[in-house]
Amino acid sequence: MIKRNAFTLIELLVVIAVLALLVAILAPALQTARKRSQAVVCLSNERQWGNFFGLYLNDHKGKFTGLGFHKWMDLLDKYADQAPKIYFCPSATQLRSQGGQDPFAAWEEDGRKGSYGTNYWIRDEAYPYLPPQYPRDGWITNFNVKGADRIPLLLDSAWPSGLPLHEDPPPEYDGQISTFDELKCMRFFCLDRHNHAVNGLFMDFSARRIPLKQLWELPWHRNWNRLSDPPPEWPDWMADF
C-alpha cells in the first residue's frame, strides 16, 4: 500500500476557493475599519492644531497675524515641528504632483505641503483687496467671539485656505475643486473624505465630524446666512447625504 503525503489538486483548489471567499467577505470590513481609523487620526491631528493655535495666541497676546493661504503654517511651525505627520489627513497624504486624486489629494504651494486648510475670514485685520461680492464687514478679527464653537477654523481641505460664501455652489462631482480664478471656495472644503463628511477644528479649539451639507450652515464670517436660505441646489452625488 502506498501512503499519500500530499494534497490532491482538487483539495488545493478547494482550499484556494475557501480563502478567496474569506478574503471577499472580510475585505469590505477591513476597508471600513481602515477608513474609521483614518478619521480618528485626522480628528486627533486637528485637536493638536487646536493646541498649537492656543499656544501661539498665548504667546502673542491673543493676536493671530493672519490665517491667509499657508501663512498659518509659518506661524505655527515653532509648535508643530516635532510632528510633521499632522500636516496631513491620513486619508490624503499623496500630493497631486505625485498622482494624488481629489478628494484625497494633498496640496503643495510655495514649498509647503498638507491636506488641511484654514478659514481665511479669520484675521486680526480686514483684508482690503477682494471682489465686491465679499462682505467688507465679514472679517472675524478676535478669537474671543460669540459662537466660537460653530465658526470653522481649520478643516480637511484641497488648498491651504479659503474664503467661502453661502452662494458658493457644491461640487458637481466628488473631487471637483475650484480654481483660484473661480473663487468658489466652499469647494475647497466640500470633500467626501470621511463618509460624507470632513473633519474640522473650530474657533473654541474643539474638533468634530462635519457632514458636507452642514458646511453651508456654519458661520464662516460675521454676515453668514445662518438660515441657509435658500439652501444650495445639491448635485446628484450629494442628494442622499
Image (cartoon, rainbow, N blue to C red):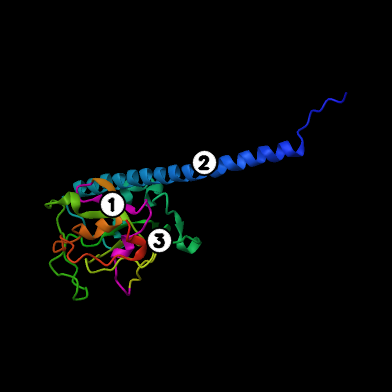
Marks counted in the figure total 3
The one nearer the camera, 157 or 130, is 157
Residue name at image x 18 percent, y 62 percent: 228
Where residue 165 sits: x, y (%)? 22, 66
Secondary structure of the residue carrying tag 3 is strand
Name the secondary structure under disc 1: strand
User: From the viewer's perspective, is 214 left or right of 24?
Assistant: left
Question: Nearest the camera: 109 or 158?
Answer: 158
- Sequence order check: which comes first, mark 3 or mark 2? 2
| Kind of residue sitting beneath label 2 | Leu
Image coords of residue 110 (percent x, y): 39, 64
Looking at the rendered structure, which numbered label has been put on residue 26? 2
Residue 55 disc label: none
Query: In this view of the protein, can residue 70 be seen by the observer?
Result: no
Toward which corner of the image does residue 141 lie, by quadrant?
Answer: bottom left
Q: Which amino acid does the dot numbered 1 rest on?
A: Ile
Q: Are marks 1 and 3 in contact (CB under 8 Å)?
A: no
Q: Which residue was labeled with disc 1?
A: 210
Is residue 100 shown in magenta?
no
Front label number (3 vs 2): 2
The segment highlighted magenta reads 181-205
Query: Which comes sooner in the sequence, label 1 or label 3?
Result: 3
Q: Residues within 10 Å of mark 1 (few under 14, many from 20)?
A: some
Disc 3 marks which amino acid? Trp
Label 3 sits on residue? 107
Disc 2 element: helix
